[in-house]
Image (cartoon, helix red, strand yellow):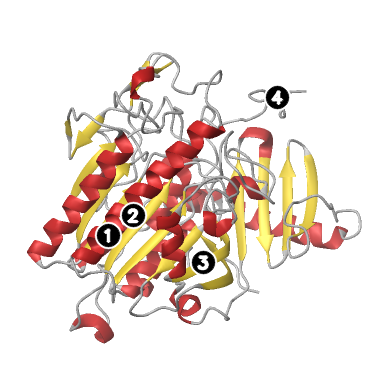
Amino acid sequence: MKTCMTGAMTRRTALAALGSAVAAPAVARGGRSGARRPNILYIMADDMGHADLGCYGSRDIRTPAIDAIAARGVKFGNAYANSCVCSPTRIALLTGRYQGRFRIGLEEPIAFNGDELSLPRGTRTLPGLLRDLGYATSLVGKWHVGELPASSPLDHGYDYFFGIASGGTDYFAHATTINGHEMGKLFENRTEIQRPGYLTDLLGAKAIDRMRLAARQDRPFFISLHFTAPHWPWQGPGDAAQGSAAADPRQMDGGNVRAYAAMMEGMDANVGRVLAELAALGLQEDTIVIFTSDNGGERFSDSWPLTGMKGELLEGGIRVPLIVSWPAHLPKGRDSAQVTMSMDALPTLLSAAGGDPGRVEGLDGIDLMPFLRDVDSRTDRTLFWRHRAGDQIAVRSGQWKYLRSYGRDYLFDLSQDERERADRKAAMPGKVAELKAAHAGWLAQMLPYPEHSYSEDMLGKFADRPRE
């Protein structure tokens, strides 16, 4: 059985290897060195539930544009985020590595102590590797891998940045305050700016601008379109008259499923505009389009039939939609059962672009291109999670999932029980011991949590999660 561990390491070795993702530049493989490289549009939602898309079974939210990506591509049913919260997943996406290999990845998520945190300079990143291959690289939307000026997308492989650095913001005011901490300001590159309009619309329009510019320059593009929707505050496109949510952007006393649906459908409308422009530019056939989410859904999302939510290592907190289309090269309208993780994006997209992931040291993710081309193929792998709040850990190995949460152990057969209700721990103590030992081996490779690192805890926030 394949695992994502790269060999036994002590905590001291892991600390010493903090910046060991530095490697020689990726080189083009002969197969695509003389051909035009595909454009890449990587679309990420924020705090979206597994069942919030029509193509994943949404009962109330209409997402025709995103559903159309699935109709033109491959839809994964066993895709996972690297974390149940924002920042760690984004770090794994950038680096192709487990976030626990980096100090900044130990914040779950980056909250009020991120002003000086950053990935180590020189860390090889997905946009940086693609830029080495000639791509125009843009981040449009949410960064949340440290705060400017200490940590800018421009320092980690992107040529251009338009969006917010922090976890969330008012969709109309583009600024907010939590516990006296100002956040959510809008930036273009390193400069704070003012733009009127609903943030989701601004991000969609800017992505179109960047596609047009790359087309005029005749350069392949990599655009990370990282929407803040449907993350709080609960503001749909038509809610400007309600005023700012800055007094309490988390809105524990507000929001509803209708506002959430409006945010989702506003995001889908912008995905539709971006895809329409892609077609108008004549780029649709040879552009890789990916749609996913950074973690499971929050309080108004739908994750049926999964249980759990953001901040939890139950399936509803970590299993996410993943859709990949590349009309000129991949099957259309197919499903894949291959188990994936956010960190697979780097080796997969680098490979598709003609680079060589084998030249990048220390990758934990795998190249998914063989499973995208042949959707009936798959490989077993073992994936690991941890979340400090509730002392949560999880392992998925084949059909089995071991979970420890708030002091209790569980074992689930996900091939029969994706809702995680039938605990097999008592019947299979050997499997529990095997997966616990595997997790311990993986954990020895990760950095230890600092004493005061932040970890989001959902207990006590909602009526169905009371603190005992």
Question: Is 328 on the left-hand or right-hand side of 161?
Answer: right
Closer to the chain start, of discs 4 and 2, is 2
Q: Quadrant of the N terminus?
A: bottom right
Q: Dot 3 corresponds to which residue?
A: 75
Quote the CA–CA distance across marks 4 and 1: 42 Å
Q: Dot 2 corresponds to which residue?
A: 272
**Amino acid type, callout 3:** Lys
Residue 126, above or below 155: below
Q: Dot 1 corresponds to which residue?
A: 276
Q: Mark 4: which secondary structure? A: loop
**Amino acid type, callout 4:** Ala
Which one is nearer the viewer's eye here, 190 or 207?
Answer: 207
Most distant residue in the left direction: 217
Q: Are marks 2 and 1 in contact (CB under 8 Å)?
A: yes
**Amino acid type, callout 2:** Gly
Q: Residues within 10 Å of mark 4 (few under 14, many from 20)?
A: few
In the image, what residue occupies the spot 25% across and 75% down?
A: 27
> Is there any visible trace of residue 354 in the rendered image?
yes
Closer to the chain start, of discs 4 and 1, is 1
Quote the CA–CA distance across marks 2 and 3: 18 Å
